[in-house]
Image (cartoon, rainbow, N blue to C red):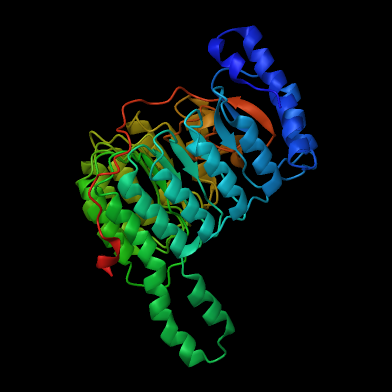
Amino acid sequence: MPSLSRYHGNTNSTVALRMVNKSLSELYKAVCVEHQIKLNPDILEVLEKTKVSENFTLKLTGNNRLRHIQRLNDGDALVVSKCLQNNKCVTGLDVRYNNITNEAVKHLVDLLQDKNSALRTLDLMFNNIESDGAEVLANCLQCNCSLLTLRLSGNKIRNRGGMHLASMLQVNNTLQELEMADCDLVSTGFLTLCECEHSQQVAVSLSFFLSLQATQSVIAFSIVLKSNKALRSFDISRPLLFSHQEEWAVRFSEMLAVNSSLVELHLGKMGMTNTGMEKLTEGLRLNRSLRFLDLRCNRVTQDGVRLLAEVLKQNTALEILDLSSNRIEDEGAVYLSEAITWPGCTLRELSVISNNIRTEGLVSLAQALKANATLTHIYIWGNHLEQPVCQAFGELISSGRLSPEQTDVSPYKVDSQVFLAEVFHSLRKRFYSMDTNSSDTCSNSDTSLVNATGMSTDVAGTSPDAPLVPLQSYW
């Protein structure tokens, strides 16, 4: 089997990098032969055709829209992990939208445990990883001090997997980004029982226990984030919550009141109402680190936005706010406009897409943009774009106050009347990212190699001796 070790001594040399690139493809073929695994032509094509540089991300996504991709399976993951051992150039591995299961996670963990591994970013979004795979990852990361980004969104790790990852954050003081959206954080056992149970009465009686299990792992993360000082970005959107009491909002509010390291928080599709917003804003008033707050696809109305607008007048840290697909209507938009024009408001990007806002609210937002030069991005599509609204935003764009690339509408004229057309721009998906090529608006699905940033070195290392909070004692 070809070895890469002789090329690692001079990674700054162009010749050495070419030799590493060549040997990666050769090594891939050799490992496939050794383990009797069929070659994946898409992996081979990437390794042969893409130029290698220092610190790059190996991108092997399975969702290419332009051509058919042979998605990675567990055998492919084994071969890739073997090829990347002792490799100092690959600092990121992106294997989204493939057929990777719990078995493949064991191979990737072997790569993370390799003391010579340079891997800093691991993207496993939308694979077939379940609770057991999440447990294996969590156990590995308790001792790992190199991985900075872990993306697990779209894997059904459920409540047990979530609890293992929450416990991991008590020990790991290196991980800076964790994405766990759409992970079905709910107990598998209760789900199976409810699916099989024909009696409506028993199903209703189980709903209480189901809500406790669903909320358990969500609240666990809020608890550990009170003491974790390394995590900068956290996404826990769309857990399967069945309780209407919004206990999670109380816990996250308490966490935000004391956390001084988190800069990005995604709480989309949480089923949050105005009551939850009231609880959450109590912690936001005391927080001075959060820059990006994602509250899309909730059930917030004008009363909830009124409370949030008061926070914007006091909190000088928040810069990006996503309220897409709520129902704030005109009154809510007016509250936001007042906050935007408030002296000292630092909001730079705002999305109010699909909020049933009409002329009064949208025109007030347009006027707020004229009064405050800090707000540079605004997204309004999906509301009622009547003639005064079209005229107001048309003037903002034509005057140069609002850049065409920083909004999702574009003006055009028909019979001297101004209308607005939709432009496919949207609020950035990430604010804090270790990957320079992670797109703010839409991700590139091509299978390729992309450059990665230099990694931050101002975080503490793993501390196995750190005191642990007994999570189970909270329920």
Asked if 109 appears above or below 306 in the picture, the reply is above
Look at 68% across and 51% down and name the residue there.
99
Question: Is the residue 317 above or below the residue 190 in the image?
Answer: above
**Residue 303 visible in the displayed image:** no
Q: In this view, does 232 lie to the left or right of 195?
A: left
Looking at the image, residue 279 sits to the left or right of residue 454; the answer is left
Which residue is drawn at the image coordinates 56% and 18% (left, top)?
54
Q: In this view, does 390 lie above or below 328?
A: above
Q: Quadrant of the N terminus?
A: top right
Q: Is 221 rendered above or below residue 422?
A: below
The residue that appears at 37% across and 54% down in the rendered structure is: 166
Q: Where is residue 163 in the image (x, y as percent from the top left)?
A: 39, 59
Q: Which of 460 and 139 is in front in this view?
A: 139
Q: Nearer the viewer, residue 206 or 312?
A: 206
Q: Where is residue 376 in the image (x, y as percent from the top left)?
A: 42, 31
Kindly indicate the quadrant of the structure image that contains residue 37: top right
Q: Nearer the viewer, residue 87 or 331?
A: 87
Q: Quadrant of the C terminus?
A: bottom left
Residue 419 appears in view = yes
* Viewer-side residue, 306 vs 149: 149
Q: Please provide percent x and percent y for residue 261.
A: 28, 38
| Residue 182 appears left or right of 474 | right
Count numbered badges in the picture.
Answer: 0
